[in-house]
Amino acid sequence: MQAGQPDKLSETTLQSRQHHNKEHYNQQKANFNLKMSTEEHVWRAHIVKCLRERNRKECENFKEIIEQNNRLIDHVAQLKSDNLKLSVENEQLRSAVSTGGSGTGVQGAAVATLEKKLLSQQEELIELHKRKGENSQLIVDLNMKVEQQRITMSEKEHSLAEEQTNNNRLRAEVHLLHSSLEELKKLNNTLLDEHTALQLAFSSLEDKMRGIQDENRCLVERLMRHKSKDADKLNEENESIIRKRLPSIFRKRSAKLKRDLEDAVREPSNSAPTSGNRNSTSPAQFVGGGMITDDDFDEATINGAMEAIGIDDTEYFNARFTAGELRPSLDTLKASGYLGQANPTKILMKFEAHENESHAVRWSPVERMVATGGADRKVKLWDIGKNSTEPRAVLSGSSAGINSVDFDSTGAYILGTSNDYGARVWTVMDNRLRHTLTGHSGKVMAAKYVQEPIKVVTGSHDRTLKIWDLRSIACIETKFAGSSCNDLVTTDSLGSTIISGHYDKKIRFWDIRTEKQADDVLMPAKITSLDLSKDCNYLICSVRDDTIKLLDLRKNQVISTFTNEHFKISCDFARASFNSNGLKIACGSADGAIYIWNVNGFLETTLKGHSTAVNAVSWSPNHNELASVGKSKRCIIYSDS
């Protein structure tokens, strides 16, 4: 019976441990709940949920073991009770055997049965003790796991505390950043108000400046008109006086000049005259020698008379040359200096302007700088004065290829048109995009300033011309041409007249002050470009039939045609150009050459250097230099020195 005491002790120990674990768990839970009560509600709910889940899982693991252990204890108690009863019966039987011998056989059988039953009970008890030991070992292992879980929970609690501290710190930083953001918003609003006020003041001053510029321009034009009238009146008076006195002198001089020119024509020349070509410039050196040594004329008197009436040797020679009375050879004209200033035949610079085909080129009116536009959607500025092959600036903003570029008269703004149906204005000083003009439904081929710097006119393939007010960045007028516009020019500083060239072979004249349109001029083929002389009296027009037409705008008629058997217009937007004094014309050809004519129709020279078709050329307004771009990436600058 002493064997049952360890079982009872083990049961008591197990219950004590369970009670201790439960109390420790409840104490930990109470402490944890007390600690977390100060935290955010969401953290409390989360921790409680985790604890409940852990309690549920651990209870499930221990519940089965505890129930099995309780069953074993109950079974042991039952076996102990049975053993006790059997022991009592055994003692009674032994006492009965000892007191009397009757019934010895029956009682012996009963004792044997009881002993056998007792033996089986003892074996079962041993088996139960063995299972109890296994369960005790399992409980020990589970207690070790619980301890490990407790350590893990402690580490997580420590980590949670650190995270909570970090969270509080971050909340403080967020609060500080919110405060800084509010201060910055207030400061930004203040700066916006100041910017708006400054912008209004700037707009007011700009409007005032434009008004003063317009007034100054009007006063200058009035002054020039008055001076021109006074000069014309004085010239008429002098001419009337002198023509009465010197008719015989002019007749003698004309006869002498005619004889000298005829002698010069008869002289042998190394090169034959170019058929179908004509030319005109100053003949002073050609006719000067014989005239000065002629004793039949009073040179001082003749020169004084011609100066008084505004006639010089050049004009007199031009009149006879144009009338067809004289046909000197090319060598004779070059030797006499009749061809004027030298042509820019030497390559000054050669560089890759764009990533692919180049479409447009234009000189700055005030600097020795060139602007180019290409199919790579960029406008680039090149400093020719510094002989630099790196761009001074790259102006971006267009989403398609550039078709034309142009400066305003001050060189402060540059205007570019694009295939993305828009035109853009950049400032040269800071290379910033100032205005974007959108509204056309076709690619914009040309743009010019009108009443600069207030308005801009654009011509497009959508068969319209649009006039834009740069102050409001809005289209204020649309003119319907009925045909795609390829190029346009304005005739004066006020931009009162716009001239446009179209695909339907017509040159159209528009007066922006009225709704009326002047008579059109019909060309033999579609027009690729237009350019005005500096005095706005002459217009050149490149035509797709491989000719260039010279128009006198005072008569609105073609006065000369320029062509050559090798000259071919390169594309539908090929650009021709006047030089600065309006005496020469240049245009690129499909064979890569640039042809230069005198305004009287004489082909002076052809410039080589391009390996592909030349799309556009531009004369420098201040130097005897010519810029050109073509279907290749290359831009070439030609100079006379």
Image (cartoon, rainbow, N blue to C red):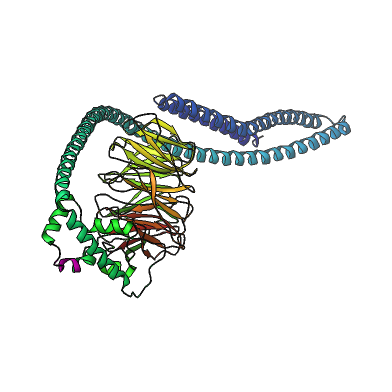
Q: Position of residue 360 (x, y in %)?
A: 39, 51
**Residue 307 shown left or right of residue 156 in the figure:** left
Report the label total: 0
Side of 628 where 125 appears, left or right: right
Magenta-tinted stretch: 290-296
Quarter placement of the C terminus? bottom left
Foreground residue among 24 and 563: 563
- Asked whether residue 292 is drawn in magenta, I would say yes
Where is residue 535 shown, x and y percent of the image?
Answer: 27, 46
Kindly identify the residue that appears in the image at 58 percent across and 33 percent down. 58
- Nearest the camera: 624 or 414? 624
Displayed quadrant of residue 399: top left
* Residue 506 or residue 586, whichever sits in front: 506
Q: Residue furthest front?
A: 248
Q: Is residue 296 left or right of residue 347?
A: left
Question: Does the segment drawn in magenta span residue 180?
Answer: no
Residue at screen point 15% across, 69% down:
293
Viewer can see residue 134: yes
Q: Position of residue 364 (x, y in %)?
A: 28, 50
Name above or below for residue 552 compared with residue 273.
above
Location of residue 142 with respect to 592 vertically, above or below: above
Question: Percent x, y for residue 147?
Answer: 51, 39
Residue 641 visible at all:
no
